[in-house]
Image (cartoon, grey):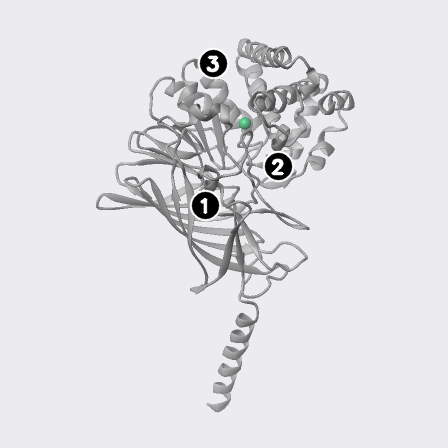
Amino acid sequence: MKKRYSLIVIVVLFFTLTLSACNCKYIENSSGENTQKHFYEINAYLNTDYKLLECEMRVDYVNKFEKSKNYIEFDLYPNAFSQNSIYKPVSFQNINLIYPEGISYGSVKINSVKNKGNNLFYEIVDFDSVLRIYPQEKIKSGEVFSAEIDFTVQFPCAFHRLGFYDNCFNAGNFYPSVCQENDDGFVHGNYHITGDPFDTDYADYEVYLNVPQNYLVAHSATAEWETINGKRKTIFIKGQDIKDFAFSASQNYKKISGETSSGTVINYYYLNEKFSETVLRTALKGYEFFDEAFCNTEKKKFDIAQTYLFSGGMEYSEMIMLSTEIFTDEYVAERIALHETAHQWWYYLIGSNQKFSPWIDEGLSEFSVYYYFLNNDKNKSEIFIDEIKSNIAYFENYSEKESDLKPLEDIYYFTGENAELAYSVSVYSASFFFFYNLYSDNKENFIGNLNNLCEDFKYKSLSQNEFISYIEQLKNFKKYYQKLSA
Ligand SMILES: [Zn+2]
């Protein structure tokens, strides 16, 4: 008896000391392996009366770097929409396009930060754009630290990734997300008027989303179950290896669905039924085509949300948003649906850096639209080429200098009055022609190299140099790349 008692004391003491020494644990999957990924558990309550998202979140942060961490930093993207924001989400020239009822502000308020129920010291830095949390002790390399963050998001009345209008809510980049890291530390996201200022790690998510019972929700990842409680419902959503979690919710949504030949269910949530069959059919055919041409995503579902957005569309993991503004013309609706769908490969499946090398995912998504049309509707591939040519001609005429095209720049390079135009013609149109020329001179080899890239980098982050190593052997690469970097 005594011996056994002593053994229990030693075992309990050992675990108590181990736990209190580092205050952390290693994340293990069901096979007991260290998965080395951040994990987010989010409980979100959509308050449609006050236009709020009330959230409790637990993050298991993994220190994947050699150096110990004194603190962890999280991007607070909703604060870009606040009154005193430095990193604005829209240019001065476009303010009228995004605020349908006059300027409206949004924000994220941090209510508390805890570790296992104990308050942690934290501060909001970099002009309210970053939450910095200090653990009780340094987080050593390979260790995992859990933080419980209670926060409230205020939606602005805006046609944007975060915003509401007419009982339709867009919740893109709404939660504090771990800043991108390198060997020197954390890199702040910093919202910008052009491009997609997001570069997050692949992580696992479990989300309990509570919305009014009559709301339909398009979202990242896969819903596992739904329960109804009076006038509300809770949807439990689980995602593995996703770059972000976003949703669009509305009481006005109608939904149509289809399934690809490899078993991905595609749901289209729409507010206006114009071209709804076209969008679903195009997304199904496009998804099947890209699965075949590049590599199979092996995903169960993909949601498309028609919503109030000032730009044509926005990509998230296993979900895209399409602006209600693009449904004036069938070709435009089709080509934008294809572009955003292609981002499921170029951004989500292959995680290139959208802030510092946007030419990769935007150029490849544009090329994918062309490649789809070339193989499915040749006439539209010619219309597409003409469209891109006229974009470049318009810009050159406007700027009177071809050298103003800067496809290889990061998103922050583009500022001032012509930022959106210079960005879109550089990063979409000029890079499209780079990929188009490379394809035209190499055909099978070009697609073959994209296949290899897809298989090697499936759900992994890809650097610009790593990407170039997949295409630099192709005929005339140097010639076209020099033009891109001129
Ligand atoms: Zn895009």
**Relative vertical location of residue 273 with respect to residue 130 in this rendering, above or below:** above
Towards the viewer: 127 or 118: 127
The C terminus sits in image quarter: top right
Residue furthest front in the image: 84
Q: Which residue is mark 1?
A: 175
Question: What is the spatial separation of the Cα atoms under label 3 and label 2, in whole angstroms?
Answer: 29 Å
Question: What is the spatial separation of the Cα atoms under label 2 and label 1, in whole angstroms?
Answer: 20 Å
Camera-nearest label, 3 or 2: 2
Towards the viewer: 211 or 133: 133
Label 1 is placed on what type of residue? Tyr
Ligand 1 under 8 Å from disc 1 Cβ: no
- Secondary structure of the residue carrying tag 1 is loop
Q: Position of residue 426 (x, y in %)?
A: 63, 22
Q: Position of residue 176 (x, y in %)?
A: 48, 47
Camera-nearest label, 1 or 3: 1
Question: What is the spatial separation of the Cα atoms under label 1 and label 3, in whole angstroms?
Answer: 35 Å
Q: Position of residue 482 (x, y in %)?
A: 76, 23
Q: Which residue is mark 2?
A: 353
Q: Position of residue 148 (x, y in %)?
A: 45, 57
Mark drawn on residue 331 = 3
Label 3 is placed on what type of residue? Tyr
Sort mark 1 into few (<14), some (14-19) or many (20+) by Cα contacts within 10 Å. Answer: many
Q: Are marks 3 and 2 in contact (CB under 8 Å)?
A: no
Which residue corresponds to the image point at 69% horizontal and 15% vertical from the top-left?
402
- Secondary structure of the residue carrying tag 2 is loop
Q: Is residue 71 left or right of residue 329?
A: right
Q: Is residue 146 left or right of residue 433?
A: left
Sort mark 3 into few (<14), some (14-19) or many (20+) by Cα contacts within 10 Å. Answer: some
Q: Is residue 144 left or right of residue 255?
A: right
